[in-house]
Amino acid sequence: MPEIQRVLFVFPETRYPSGQPPLGLASLSAQARAAGCEPFLCDMSFVREPFQRLQEMMDSVDPDMVAVSVVTPQLEAVVRTAEIVRRKAKRDCLLVIGGPHATVLPEDTLERTCADLVYSGEGDLAFRRLVETGNWDDLPGACWMEDGKARRNPGLLLVPDLDSLPIPDRSIFKMEDYFAHWYSMDRVDPSLRGTSVMGTRGCPFTCTFCQPTLSEIFGGRLRKRSASLMVDEIELLVADYRIDAFMFEDSTFIIDKEWVHGICDALMERKLDLKWCCNIRADLLTDELLSHMRAAGLSKVNMGVESASQRVLDDIYDKGITVEGVRRALRMARKHGVFVQGYFMLGAPGETVEEMRRTIAFAAREPFDDAVFDITTPFPHTRLWDLTKDLINRDYSEFDCFHTSVYELEGITPVGIERMKKRAFWRFYMHPFRILRTLRTALGPRNFRRTLVKARRV
């Protein structure tokens, strides 16, 4: 029998719910079941009183372990979660916190939450070992208090073969809530019933707003699940949940073209007839690859553009793409009838007001179908954070890339950046090129609730 019998997972998303279930927790739930544990989930995404819900679940579940995943904007909710766990636990209950924020700031997370254990890195193997033994003395990535001081074990415990992992356990989610809020492909067809899948871990690129955090979690090498197992999972989602669409959430989905071709072949051989989308880099897209993906059901791509200033792309973000390359990829997608969503950021340190305006004009003028404008936010321990610490004017518990600028910049105030971001959305979606499609998508009866959810991020 495992040391831990009942695990309560907590997803502390209290402000910005989306239709994308946290697959990391689903993977840990699968590990819990494989180890003979009973998993439960307190999902705060769609609950009016999330912390009251947590208190109720602490009473009803009486867990041996509470496991919480945290990204930086959720830190405040996690601190409150930890207080409730300590207050409501009927007996000794192990409080474990992991995720990206815990990985890069384990000692600080430990101090703020008073957790029993903060874990840095990929959690699958470590979690399995923890629930089976209850011991973390020699667990790579573990951080805990001992004799009044934080002790941290070095190293990463990575899964060498992703095919060895069980399929993520989505049964812990109220999947109908996620389907109702899934807007990843609304521009293609608001009636689509879809969800997320992931096939890779790791990223070889050096963008300053992500690295080295990604490598500290997943290592420096890109690992992939086999194409056949990826499509097995998709086929299971069709059978269990009747999906007709899905999104590959991988940030580097098309980096290994042979692997992508294999997935496309498998989708076509099994005649699943699904629409899907994925994230791409403009410099990796080829006509041959796009043609094959389109034949396999690809309907939309999400492209990280960030800025229309080549100087910002090169000197601030180290993005490794060109503005002209973005235009080339756009033209290619339009030729194949694929919708394109662009991701943009405004308010980087050293970025001028004119460069921000150029980015907004570029997004509105070029034939993007959708756009997301975020405020540049230097998440802890990224290169952007390390390079710009002296310009940051907020504690990272207040970081919010949707609404809050954390920089003191020359020539524009944080409030000015926030206003510019709102104007960017209005200028993009009210452009004559797309205003009718915007209204049809936003006001359709099936989609009005999702429009309100998306509006929280504007």
Image (cartoon, grey):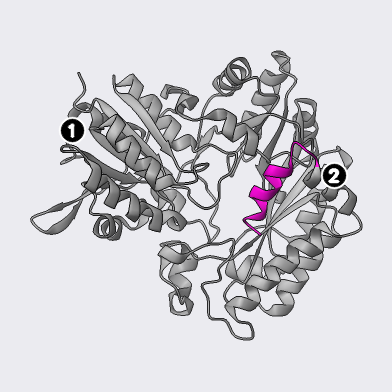
| Image quarter in which the N terminus is found | top left
Q: Where is residue 374 in the image (x, y as percent from the top left)?
A: 63, 61
- The magenta span reads 444-458
Q: Name the residue under label 1.
A: 134
User: What residue is shown at x 63% (from left), y 67% (from top)?
Assistant: 314
The disc placed on residue 440 is 2
Q: In this view, does 233 lie above or below 126?
A: above
- Report the side of 107 relative to 74 (left or right): left
Q: Is residue 335 above or below residue 325?
A: above
| Mark 1 to mark 2 CA distance (whole Å) | 54 Å
Q: Give the camera-side residue of 56 and 254.
A: 56
Q: Which amino acid does label 1 sit on?
A: Gly
Q: Is mark 1 on a helix, strand or loop?
A: loop
- Report the side of 399 relative to 412 (left or right): left
> In this view of the protein, can residue 273 be seen by the observer?
yes
Front position among marks 1 and 2? 2
Q: Is residue 98 above or below residue 314?
A: above
User: What residue is shown at x 33% (from left), y 34% (from top)?
Assistant: 8
Q: Where is residue 243 in the image (x, y as percent from the top left)?
A: 66, 23
Residue neighbourhood size for the residue with mark 1, other residues' Cα within 10 Å, grouped as few (<14), some (14–19), many (≥20): some
Q: Position of residue 437 (x, y in %)?
A: 86, 47
Q: Magenta stretch: residue 449 in it? A: yes
Q: Which residue lies furthest to the bottom in this view?
A: 411
Q: Give the camera-side residue of 19 and 89.
A: 89
User: What residue is shown at x 59% (from left), y 61% (from top)?
Assistant: 402
Q: Which amino acid does label 2 sit on?
A: Arg
> In this view of the protein, can residue 196 be seen by the observer?
no
Residue neighbourhood size for the residue with mark 2, other residues' Cα within 10 Å, grouped as few (<14), some (14–19), many (≥20): few
Q: Is mark 2 on a helix, strand or loop?
A: helix
Q: In which quarter of the image is residue 355?
A: bottom right
- Report the side of 238 relative to 331 (left or right): left
- Report the side of 281 relative to 381 (left or right): right
